[in-house]
Image (cartoon, grey):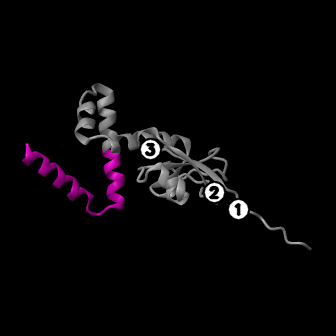
Amino acid sequence: MKVKKVKPKKYRTKYAGTRGKGVYVTLPFDPRKGVCEACGRSVHEGEIKSTALHHWWYAYKPATVAKNPLLALENTSELCYGCHQIADAIRLLLYSRPERVAKVARLLRGKQRLRFLQVLEAIMKEMLKNEKNIRERVYKIIRVKENAT
């Protein structure tokens, strides 16, 4: 009986970089496992159709990634479509000045304002599970900002 050699499937992805100037790279393997890192839903269980890599931060210039495609995997998470949409919104907040985000959020009224505050509360609760000193760091940031004004 002949043993059939299986070639690993290559994976093509876009590394956008900042300001939309991106590059497509081909990785020597598909880094996806088929499970959303955020919600845990699985392609293999039939809960979702697919996952995609989400880049939280573009740390390299596209030309650098084109020369070394494995750099495209840094600062990434595997997410389902719904979680990827949320992650895109969070990335936009990360690239924005915190003061600007606060000024825009201040415009929320009524139910939207309450909902946004509930989202912020849920974020803090979730992060407190994983990071021991986050509460102290957040309060320290707030105190430093208040003392500066």
Q: Which numbered tag is attached to residue 30?
A: 2
Res. 37 visible in picture: no
- Residue receiving disc 1: 8
> Does the image show residue 21?
yes
Single out the mark in the foreground, 3 or 1.
1
Quote the CA–CA distance across marks 3 and 1. 29 Å
Return the mark for residue 87.
3
In magenta segment, residue 122? yes
Instruction: Report x, y in % for residue 23.
Output: 53, 46
- For the N terminus, the image quarter is bottom right
- Which mark is first along the chain, 1 or 3? 1
Task: Report the span colored magenta.
Answer: 121-149
Do the residues under discs 1 and 2 have CB atoms within 8 angstroms? Answer: yes
Q: Residue at x 35, y 59 (%)?
A: 129
* Residue nearest the observer in this picture, 51 or 13: 13
Please tell me the numbered disc located at residue 105: none
Label 3 to label 2, Cα distance in Å?
Answer: 21 Å
Query: Residue type at mark 3?
Result: Ala
Label 2 secondary element: loop
